[in-house]
Amino acid sequence: MGPSFTLVMMGSGFGSIFGPEDFNPMLTVVSNTLTATGTVVDLGNTSGNALLVTDTGKVVSTGVGGTAISGLANDQSVAVYGMAVSSDGTAISLQGDFSMVTIGSTGVVQDINTGAFAFVTLYCPGNNATVLNDGTIIGGRGVYIGSGDLINSGLIQSYLDHAVDIIRAGRVFNTGTIQSTNTGIPSNKFAVEIDGSALVENGGSILGGVLTGSSNDTVRNSGLITGDIQLGLGNDSYDGRGGQAKDTVFGGGGV
């Protein structure tokens, strides 16, 4: 017996909210357009709830501080092959542990606010999150992960802050492009920042540099990294064989 699911085909319209009462838990499929001024799709506080946005689906939040897709429980997952967009807020926010977000090659996750107070585009602050991106993630503050893995073969771009910010232990595997175009506050301009134990394996392009914390960190670069690579305290390692580092590699204060 296959997984149960709900197929949602709704027209665009303000106030169209798909809430936690519609999950059982189950896979929900959005194949048309859902629009609201606040949270559009709410996975609620039930572990295991999942959402699929097909290549014809769009989830759009139009209000200030609105979230296109939101969830609070552990083990929730979202897959986007269409669009998840917030005009002035967070596109996807999954706040539990073991969250998973997949963006397919046709998928777009975007915060379109271009102001100085743009929100995080994709927000997974829990532990052991996984983000797999083969599409496009673009916004003021990029991807924020508590701890976990980012596997990118698409485009992640931010213009106000880090494109990828992992605040505890994390791994980044990149064969696509990760870019921060921020030229403001120096500590916020790095394309990738990992504050805990860090592993960065780059076979693509990281445009804006890499910043790690005080743990034992490893950067392997067989692609292109522009901007400084700043390895903090700890026993750190940089392996640039087969790659290019256009700016300076700083080893930090470790061994």
Image (spheres, rainbow, N blue to C red):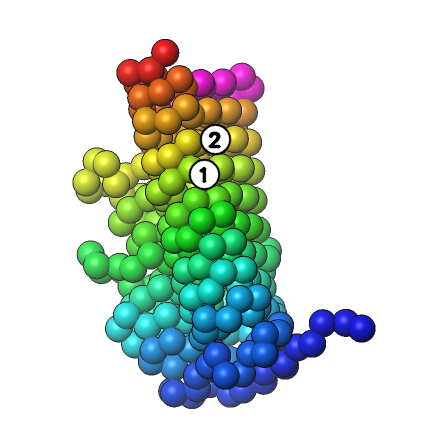
Q: Amino acid at mark 1?
A: Gly
Q: Which residue is mark 1?
A: 170
Report if residue 192 is visible in the image: no
Q: Amino acid at mark 2?
A: Leu
Would you identify the image quadrant in which residue 92 lies?
Answer: bottom left
- The tag on residue 47 is none
For image coordinates 47% across by 65% down, the residue present is: 73
Report if residue 2 is visible in the image: yes
Image side of residue 123 versus residue 205, left or right: left
Relative image position of residue 141 (x, y in whole percent): 32, 52
Query: For mark 1, does the 10 Å Cα neighbourhood hold few (<14), some (14 to 19), or many (20 or more) residues?
Result: many
Q: Which residue is mark 2?
A: 199
Query: For mark 2, does the 10 Å Cα neighbourhood hold few (<14), some (14 to 19), or many (20 or more) residues?
Result: many
Question: Is 124 or 56 nearer to us in this picture?
Answer: 124
For image coordinates 19% across by 42% down, the residue present is: 184
For the residues bearing labels 1 and 2, Cβ distance under 8 angstroms: yes
Image side of residue 226 versus residue 100, left or right: left
Image quadrant in which the N terminus is located: bottom right
The mark that comes first in sequence, 1 or 2, is: 1
In the rendered image, residue 94 lying in the magenta stretch gets the answer no
Image side of residue 231 versus residue 3, left or right: left
Q: Secondary structure at mark 2?
A: strand
The magenta stretch is 237-246
